[in-house]
Amino acid sequence: MKPNAPAGRREPAYAQLASAIKQMIASGQYQPEDKIPSESAMSRSYGLSLMTVRQAIGLLVEQGLLRRVHGSGTYVRGPDWTQASFSLDGLLELLNDRDRVNIKILKAGISSAKPHTADALGLPEGAPLITLMRLVSHNGTPFLLNHAYLKFDPASPIVESELNVSSLSGLFSGQGNSFIKKAFLRVVPCLPSLEEAAQLKTDETAATFKIRYTFFDYTDSPVGSGWFLAPEEFMVLSTRIGVWDD
């Protein structure tokens, strides 16, 4: 009996079989560490070719739902709770609303690299840096305060790109922009300074998240570092763990 695709969808047979197996895992019919039927048994049961069954199993192995044990068979894997990745959906939603987002440059100038920033950018301590402090607001409400440090190169297109909204949304979505290849983000709780609290129109005792980052160009060289401060109401961290049907 061949698995059926949902109405209105035409999936290849291996994808339909993979979906059927995933539903059996999600419903508890197959429990973690259960051994599923052999590929030949499923081939006979579903009336599919052995190659199609192997493709379906291979897909679920890639997705981390099954594991193959040489000489033994294929087993259901339990969810790996340690591999959760969180998305910054709340910030992205605001940043992508371009018509209502405003970036205000509060400070811009040249400074000397302090130890932490020099280390992040691979520079000697005291090297010149372009420094920016900018406030990002949505409908007049500030929700991000950014301290940015860029390698000193006023002609660099990266410096210009850092002044617009698209670079910010690309940084948080992981898509980067035409000059930035990748970024490393680290989120930690903190309390804002008096100046930062005033800019964000919050209290200095209010919970705030600091998003530290370093981004890299297409030569894999670090070209910028800094951090964002966001009040807790704008920092919605969400993820999905385990087996989902969709």
Image (cartoon, grey):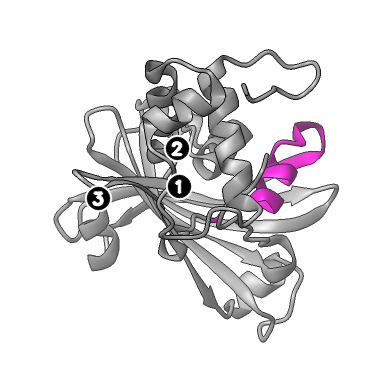
201 or 126, nearer to the observer: 201
Front tag of 3 and 2: 2
The residue wearing badge 3 is 121
- Disc 3 versus disc 1: distance between alpha carbons? 39 Å
- Disc 1 versus disc 2: distance between alpha carbons? 5 Å
Residue lying at the far bottom of the rendered structure: 205
- Coordinates of residue 106 in the picture (x, y in percent): 60, 53
Circle 1 Cα neighbour tier, 10 Å, few/some/many (<14 / 14–19 / ≥20): many
50 or 180, nearer to the observer: 50
Q: Is residue 87 visible?
A: no
Residue plotted at (29% across, 60% down): 117
Circle 2 Cα neighbour tier, 10 Å, few/some/many (<14 / 14–19 / ≥20): some
Q: Is residue 230 visible?
A: yes
Front tag of 3 and 1: 1
The residue wearing badge 2 is 60
Query: Which residues lie in the magenta part?
Result: 86-102
The residue wearing badge 1 is 65
Q: Quadrant of residue 12?
A: top right
Lateral position of residue 161 relative to residue 113, left or right: right
Q: Helix, strand or loop at disc 1?
A: loop
Lateral position of residue 4 relative to residue 166, left or right: right
Q: Quadrant of the N terminus?
A: top right
Labels 1 and 2: the sequence-earlier one: 2
Residue plotted at (53% across, 18% down): 47
Labels 3 and 1: the sequence-earlier one: 1
Amino acid identity at mark 2 = Leu
Tag 1 near tag 2, CB within 8 Å? yes
Residue 36 is labelled as none
